[in-house]
Amino acid sequence: MSANSSPPAGTRPLGPGAIAIVLVLCLSWAFNQIAIKRALPEIPPLLQATFRSAGALPVLLIFAQLRGVKMFERDGTLGLGLVAGALFGFEFVLIYQGLLLTSASRAVVFLYTAPFFVALGSFRFLGERLGPAQWGGLAMSFTGVALAIGIPQANVDGRVLLGDLLVVGGGLLWGVTTVFVKGTRLRFIAPERALGYQVGVSVPIMAAAALIAGERLAQVPSPFVIGLMAYQSIWVVGTTFTIWFALIKAYSASKLSAFTFITPLFGVVASYFILHDALTLAFGLAAVLVIIGLFLVNRPNRAVLAATDPLLNVTKT
């Protein structure tokens, strides 16, 4: 095959190596919710979120140095970055507070409603068209979320439902952030800088929220919990998010995004076995309904595929 017949950058099909990497990322994101829950007895949620973002910053700076990215270049995106960072910070305030009230298995399903909000926001504010499959997926996802929240489960009360809604709120802000980045000049800057804005601005926001909530460390965290925090900050935020951006540039974004819907399934199953979260057949069916709906929403619409921006499908946890 000649060089001219090779697939263009960003559209190559995933080979076995790339598929293996994406599966590792999905598994990592699923276990992130469990890591948060396991660390809660020793580190309150908002302090966890603060430490996680602060710990990820050096990792991003190292990646930027290795790739020759100028993190502090003046290019007129500072104001936009501050807005994106504020959205990112409040997103995780909601998610971490929600995890204090609900189970990790429920949270991982509700968090991945974010593409639902991305699709609606893109249609409303960015003028992107949705095909019948996408609208059907939106309806299916909404039905699944409503069903999952309303399903009677052991130990599910108003407190748990509030936690569910907080996580859904976090998913909403995730979607808003994605649409905001897609519709502004932030889409053109290096991924380390785009993520750096969000991580850096989120630190004082979450630290202030922790202070207002009266959170504090009762004792020095155990080595196990310190390891969980290192997993969240160094691996999940600092490393896997950067790897994801690199994959987006090299491979078909639509195919990559399809694989990310494995994450909620990983999360529900892992929470059941590790945290012994209650898992009924009805809730499992509701989770599958949400995941199938989200997959349909993110299937590429052939009529507008040429206008699709890969950054729309960037997924995080």
Image (cartoon, helix red, strand yellow):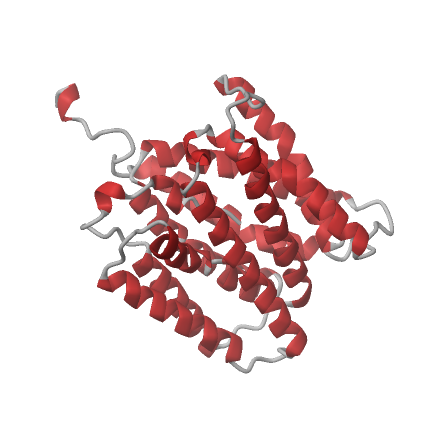
Provide residue 278's location: percent of width, then percent of height.
58, 73
The image quadrant of residue 118 is bottom left
Q: Residue at x 55, y 82 (%)?
A: 152
Q: Residue at x 56, y 31 (%)?
A: 78
Look at the image and tell me in which quarter the N terminus lies.
Answer: top left
- Residue at the limit of the structure toward the bottom, as seen here: 152
Provide residue 176's location: percent of width, then percent of height.
48, 52
Residue closer to the observer: 123 or 238: 123
Q: Residue at x 25, y 63 (%)?
A: 133
Q: Is residue 42 visible?
A: yes
Provide residue 161's location: percent of width, then percent of height.
60, 74
Q: Residue at x 53, y 37 (%)?
A: 80
Residue 225 horizontal side relative to residue 79, left or right: right
Up the image or down, 167 lies above or below 15; here it is below
Residue closer to the observer: 16 or 148: 148
Q: Is residue 230 visible?
A: no
Residue 198 horizontal side relative to residue 219, left or right: left
Provide residue 99's location: percent of width, then percent of height.
64, 61
Residue closer to the observer: 147 or 31: 147
Up the image or down, 94 lies above or below 9; here it is below
Total labels: the figure holds 0
Residue 99 horizontal side relative to residue 142, left or right: right
The image quadrant of residue 170 is bottom right
